[in-house]
Image (cartoon, rainbow, N blue to C red):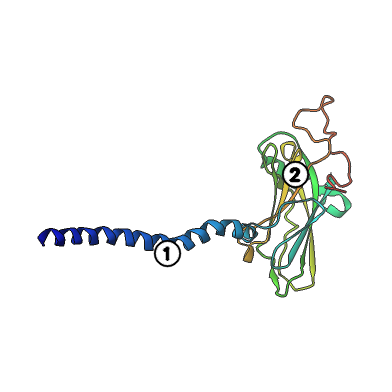
Amino acid sequence: MRRTVLVTAVACLCLVPLTGCGAGDEAAAPGASASAGAPREAAPSGSAPAGPAPVRTGETFAWPDGLEATATVLGRLRPAERTDVRAGVVAEERLARAREELLGGRSEPMGLEVTLTNTGDAPVDLDGVELQWVGVEVGGMARKAADDGAFTGELAPGRSATELSAWAVPDMVAVGYQVLVWPHGPRKGTAGQFSGTVPGASVRPPEDGHHGHTGSTGHSDHGGH
């Protein structure tokens, strides 16, 4: 009689963990399946906050909230007494200061046009907009050669705003660059990215000793144009 009780107790103890494991497996299985499948299903929506892929200069970059940007490189500027990017000139004194801030090497004065369009339903604050011109092949950054070209105020739905700016662009940037438009605000650091190269740009010194690689006053990069 005593032996029977012991066997029954042992049998009960063995059944308890087995039943617990079985119940745990059944309860965890749907959760495990969902979590394994979630990354595959959530990948497209999960990548949305990072913003759309980069576009070529001259094309349009759009954010999910309806703000759109177009960045166009206008070509080489000529040193002059004043800055008028539309006329193709930049103040020589400002250009010299911008070149002093560069790491070294040759640079060319280039014009940049950025247009922002609000296709959304709410006004967009432009006071936080920042522009950068960075090298993606070799490295480095371009420097603004003028204080103008800054967006300010508020952009109402259905309206556009355009700013022109002059830059000193080093050769290491010209061989492969991205113009970055940082709206800030609801985009939380997501930048509009515009890729391009200056035709004929090279990090090697020219054989004739002159800067002839960006001599054209036309668009320095048309992307797919």
| Left or right side of 86 for 97 | left
Residue located 77% across and 28% down the image: 205
Q: Nearer the viewer, residue 74 or 80?
A: 74
Instruction: Indicate the amino acid at tag 2.
Output: Ala
Q: Please tell me the numbered disc located at residue 168.
A: 2
Q: Nearer the viewer, residue 107 or 55?
A: 55
Crowding at dot 2, Cα within 10 Å, few <14 / some 14-19 / many 20+, comes out as: many
Of label 1 and label 2, which has the lower sequence position?
Answer: 1
The residue where tag 1 is placed is 27
Q: Which of marks 1 and 2 is in front?
A: 1
Residues tagged 1 and 2 counted as in contact (Cβ below 8 A): no
Residue 174 is situated, as x and y percent measured from the top left of the image, at 76, 40
Residue found at the very far top of the displayed protein: 207
Vertical placement of residue 222 versus 10, above or below: above
Residue 113 is situated, as x and y percent measured from the top left of the image, at 80, 55
Residue located 79% across and 42% down the image: 197
Instruction: Indicate the amino acid at tag 1.
Output: Ala
Residue located 28% across and 62% down the image: 16
Q: Which of 63 and 40 is in front in this view?
A: 40
